[in-house]
Amino acid sequence: MKIIVCIKQVPDAKDVRLDPKTNTLAREGVAAIMNPFDRHALEEAVRLKEQLGGTVTVLSMGPPQAKDVLLEAISCGADEAVLVSDRAFAGADTWATSYTLAKAVQSLGAFDLILCGKQAIDGDTAQVGPGLAAQLKLPYVTCVQKTREASTAALRVERMMDDGYDVVQLPLPALLTVVKDINEPRVPSLKGKMRAKKAEIKVLSAADIKAEAQCIGLAGSPTKVARVFSPEPRGNRRMFSGTAVEQVAQLVAEIRGYL
Amino acid sequence: MDYFLTEEQRMIKETARELTEAKIIPKRAELDERNEFAGELLADIAKADLFAVLVPEAYGGMGAGIFDIVLALEELARGCVGVATSFAACGLGILPILISGSEELKEKYLPAVAEGKSLAAFGLTEANAGSDAAGIRTTAVDGGDCWILNGTKQWITNGGEAQIYSVIALTNPEKGIRGASMFVVEDGDPGFSYGKKENKMGIRSSATCELVMKDCRIPKDRLIGRKGHGFITVMKTLDVSRPGIASLGVGLAQAALDEAARYAKQRVQFGKPIISFQAVQHMLADMAIQTEAARGLVYGAARHIDAHPEDASKISSMCKVFATDTAMKVTTDAVQVMGGYGYMKEYPVEKMMRDAKILQIYEGTNQIQRNVIGQELNREYA
């Protein structure tokens, strides 16, 4: 079973803030980490590999320093890593990113399954996973919380819903995006670290993946960000204290005051 | 301080540290409170390949030495000495096989241990054989096509959880301890059972119980090394295993120092953080001096032992005594620095202080270690 896991390097959410002048993300001095949801996608891929055999390839689109998270993925059980990196990709929105990743996947040959995190913690769009599936015309399930049954031909998974979950069966090849409930990721292993030390990351450019120039980067992005800003605090905030019963009584009295 | 570790050694340390922070620290208080064996954490340790460190490459391991395992144990002990003890006891269980076992025994048992699929344990202590190992009463009688073992081992770490047990028994009781031999007993062997799980002061996430052998029949090829050489194997095992226990003391002392210093920095009394008071500073300084001194001695001893010298016993005992006495002192002082908060279970140092005590007791009490050192000195200055 050949599994591809899409991974994004993101700024550590603990340190993220907006530059008050430019209203863009202040990335300077902020640690870059593997997107936490992608860590769960990688863990699920490694578990499926352990169960069914095969290989796990991690794929990322990003600047050269994104190699760090790919090496970390190898130390956590991935077999090989591919970085899609080109200045021409800069400014890509979710459509252009999905297109670029799809071209990269196609350049890698046959596969059985693509796993992605539900969303990246910097953009929070949750669009690239489904976008990639649409580009590749694959069946897909988002927000998977459990793999119930897996074979090299089909999967039966649970899709997390607000009021419970759906059980979905789908044939392979397919794409899943996963939520954190799906597993508890392992830490890097010793042999994995040694493999990562020797690993060579394959770097692919726009030309290598035969991407059309008008479909990538800023030029290929239909989304234009008009403005980014920190919202002003709204209204006054009151914290009630005491036992639960006392707090409810205070809350009810407060609401009555407005009626 | 830079100990000039090789790249591989840095990886071992880093792997153990990441695992400790991500997996062990979040769970240690609950396992301690519930007196629950850390089976899941040992599975995590297995996935991180740390069980492979001590096993030779020929049997699926990494073939690293005592110094390398010391680095891993120190990091694990920063998180929880209970978990680290379970891991260390597995190493102790396979050492007799590594030191004296036949090729067949090594091939049979070591690959599964390296993969973390099989946990090992070591059975020496009995009710009347603690510091005085000559008091062992367990016997092994040649039953023709098998060995028949009778006796009870006490306070065995990983008891009831391990799959393989290296135990010592008398094959020639007239010769006493010089007539002892070592065997591998497997979980599920006929006549082999476990006593109740002990309720301990500390290291509560480790399993400790009796091993009961009643006409326990095991195949002939389970004899480790030569008949009658059991006690020699035990002594050689303990010589190389003591730096491991010492490193648990170093990791624990470091963890207690970290907690106390962090607390002293943010705790304000008399209008200042308490770390600015000389009384507290001097306590922290002593804790730091003792911890670093212990680390230096343990690393030096482990490297010496990896060179397979003739005179391993004295330095091995010295590092065990010094590092574990240090752990007791530093954890006690960490509680003192943190005052009432340190005494509460909401903070980790009370557990650290309880865990420290066993380090001065198991794998040879620190009094017995001083006997070993004293006897060696007596010989050297003859």
Image: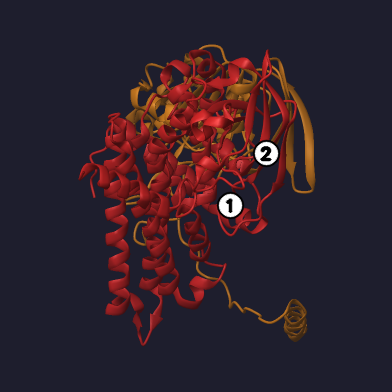
Chain colours: A orange, B red
Judging from the image, mark 1 belongs to the subunit labelled: B
Query: Quick one: B2 or B216, which is closer to the camera?
Result: B216
Residue B300 lies in what quarter of the image? top left
Q: Is residue A242 left or right of residue B20?
A: right
Amino acid type indicated by mark 2:
Gly
Q: Secondary structure under badge 1?
A: helix
Q: Residue drawn 73% across and 35% down?
A: B193
Q: Which residue is mark 2?
A: B160
The residue nearer to you, when weighing B251 against A158, is: B251
Amino acid bearing label 1: Lys
Residue B307, percent from left and from top: 27, 29
Image-based side of B247 in relation to A254, left or right: left
Dot label at residue B46: none
Question: Residue A148: x percent and y percent?
Answer: 74, 30
Whether residue B124 is visible? yes
Left or right: where A25 falls relative to B215: left
Q: Name the residue rendered at 32%, 68% in the picture.
A: B284
In the picture of the structure, the residue carrying the numbered disc 1 is B27
SS state under label 2: loop
